[in-house]
C-alpha cells in the first residue's frame, strides 16, 4: 500500500525528525482507536483501558518499578482528538523553528528530555508534596510536557520571533510561551494537576536546554548517543570511530580555519539593523544562523 510506503520513507530519512515525531504520535493514536473499537465490538472494553494503563506514567513508585518504560512512553499517548490535535499543531509550529536553527538531533533531544523532565517533576510532586500525596494515585499521558519543552525552548532561542494569531495578530513567541506556562501553573489545583506539573517540568527543561546550548553545553548528547546506538543496531551499519591528531601535527591552515567559527561583529550589527528596519522574519536562514552563533559567545 502507498500509505505503508510513505511511512517507511518518512522513517528512512535522516533529516526528517519533526515529521517522524508527528507520525509516531499519530500512529500510536490510530492504534489505540483501533484497539478501542475492536475491544468494544468484542465485548471486552476493559482491555483498552489495560493497554493505555501499561504505557501511561503512574504516580505510585511500585507501579513505576513494574513499568519503568512509562517515563517515556506516556509522551506518545493521547486520548481524544482535541488532545492530540492541539499538541501536534504546537509541535509542528514550534518544532519547525527548533529544527531550522538547531537541527533534527537537538529537536529530538529536546522532545525526549522534556518528556523525561516532565515525568520526574510529576513523580516528585506526587510523592513528596503532601497535598498530592493525600490524594488518590494518578496517571499522566500525552505529549504536552515534551511539546511545552519545545515551545519554551523556541521562545528562549528566538524570543522576538512572531506568529500571526487569529484575533490577536502578530504576537512574539516569548509571550505565547509565557501564557502557556501561566495556564499550566493556574491548572495545578484543577482536575489535571499531574498533566500541568508535567508541562512545568517540560518548560523548565526547554529553558535550561537552550541556555546551556548557548553556553556551549549540549544536554542532549546522551539522547543522541543512545539514538546512534539504536540506529546502528537496526541498520546493521558499524559505528564510525573518530581519531584525533595532536595539535602539533595539524597544518597551520587548519588551525586558522578552526578559529574562524563565529561571525564578525560588523556582520552582526548589519543583521541587527536589518531586524530593526524590517523585523526578524526578514532575515535569511544564513543570517539567522549567524545571529544564533553570535549568541553563543
Image: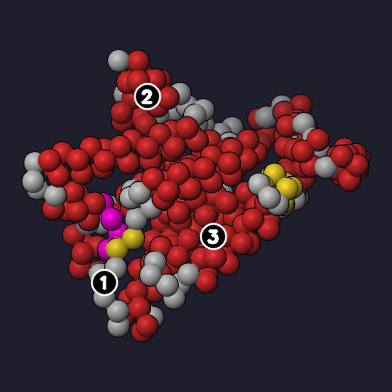
| Magenta run includes residue 58 | yes
Q: Give the image location of residue 24, x and y in percent.
A: 37, 37
Disc 3 or 2, which lies upstream in sequence? Answer: 2
For marks 2 and 1, give the CA distance. Answer: 37 Å
Q: Name the residue under label 3.
A: 203
Disc 1 or 3, which lies upstream in sequence? Answer: 1
- As drawn, is 71 to the left or to the right of 281? left
Q: Give the number of the disc on residue 273.
A: none
Q: Can residue 171 be seen in this view?
A: yes
Residue at x-position 76% and y-position 26% = 253
The quadrant in which residue 20 appears is: top left
Secondary structure, mark 3, is helix
Residue at x-position 34% and y-position 74% = 126
- As drawn, is 142 to the left or to the right of 134? right
Q: Which of 108 and 6 is in front in this view?
A: 6
Residue at x-position 73% and y-position 32% = 285
For marks 1 and 3, give the CA distance. Answer: 24 Å
Residue span colored magenta: 54-59
For marks 3 and 2, give the CA distance. Answer: 30 Å
Q: Name the residue under label 2.
A: 7
Other-residue count near label 3 (Cα within 10 Å), few / some / many at <14 / 14–19 / ≥20: many
Other-residue count near label 1 (Cα within 10 Å), few / some / many at <14 / 14–19 / ≥20: few
Q: Give the image location of residue 89, x and y in percent.
A: 52, 42
- As drawn, is 14 to the left or to the right of 163? left
Amino acid at each position: 500500500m502507498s500509505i505503508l510506503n510513505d511511512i517507511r520513507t518518512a522513517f528512512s530519512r535522516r533529516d526528517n525528525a519533526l515529521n517522524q515525531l508527528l507520525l509516531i504520535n499519530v500512529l500510536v493514536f490510530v492504534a489505540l482507536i483501533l484497539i478501542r473499537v475492536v475491544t468494544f465490538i468484542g465485548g471486552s472494553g476493559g482491555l483498552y483501558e489495560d493497554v493505555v494503563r501499561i504505557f501511561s506514567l503512574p504516580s505510585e513508585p511500585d507501579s513505576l518499578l513494574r513499568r519503568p518504560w512509562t517515563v517515556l512512553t506516556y509522551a506518545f499517548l493521547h486520548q481524544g482528538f482535541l488532545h492530540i490535535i492541539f499538541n501536534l499543531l504546537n509541535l509542528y509550529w514550534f518544532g519547525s523553528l527548533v529544527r531550522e536553527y538547531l537541527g533534527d538531533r537537538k529537536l529530538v533531544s529536546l522532545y525526549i528530555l522534556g518528556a523525561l523532565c516532565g515525568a520526574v517533576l510529576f513523580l516528585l510532586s506526587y510523592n513528596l508534596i503532601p497535598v498530592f500525596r493525600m490524594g488518590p494515585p494518578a496517571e499522566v499521558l500525552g505529549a504536552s510536557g515534551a511539546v511545552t519543552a519545545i515551545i519554551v525552548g523556541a521562545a528562549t532561542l528566538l524570543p522576538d520571533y512572531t506568529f500571526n494569531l487569529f484575533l490577536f495578530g502578530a504576537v512574539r513567541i516569548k509571550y505565547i510561551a509565557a501564557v502557556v506556562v501561566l495556564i499550566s501553573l493556574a491548572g495545578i489545583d484543577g482536575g489535571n494537576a499531574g498533566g500541568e506539573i508535567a508541562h512545568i517540568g517540560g518548560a523548565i527543561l526547554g529553558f535550561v536546554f537552550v541556555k546551556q546550548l548557548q553556553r556551549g553545553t549540549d544536554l542532549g548528547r546522551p539522547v543522541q548517543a543512545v539514538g546512534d546506538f539504536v540506529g546502528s543496531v537496526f541498520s546493521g551499519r558499524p559505528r564510525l570511530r573518530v581519531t584525533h591528531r595532536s595539535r602539533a601535527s595539524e597544518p597551520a591552515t587548519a588551525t586558522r580555519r578552526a578559529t574562524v567559527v563565529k561571525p564578525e561583529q560588523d556582520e552582526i550589527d548589519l543583521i541587527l539593523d536589518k531586524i530593526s528596519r524590517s523585523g526578524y522574519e526578514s532575515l535569511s536562514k544564513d543570517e539567522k544562523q549567524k545571529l544564533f552563533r553570535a549568541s553563543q559567545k
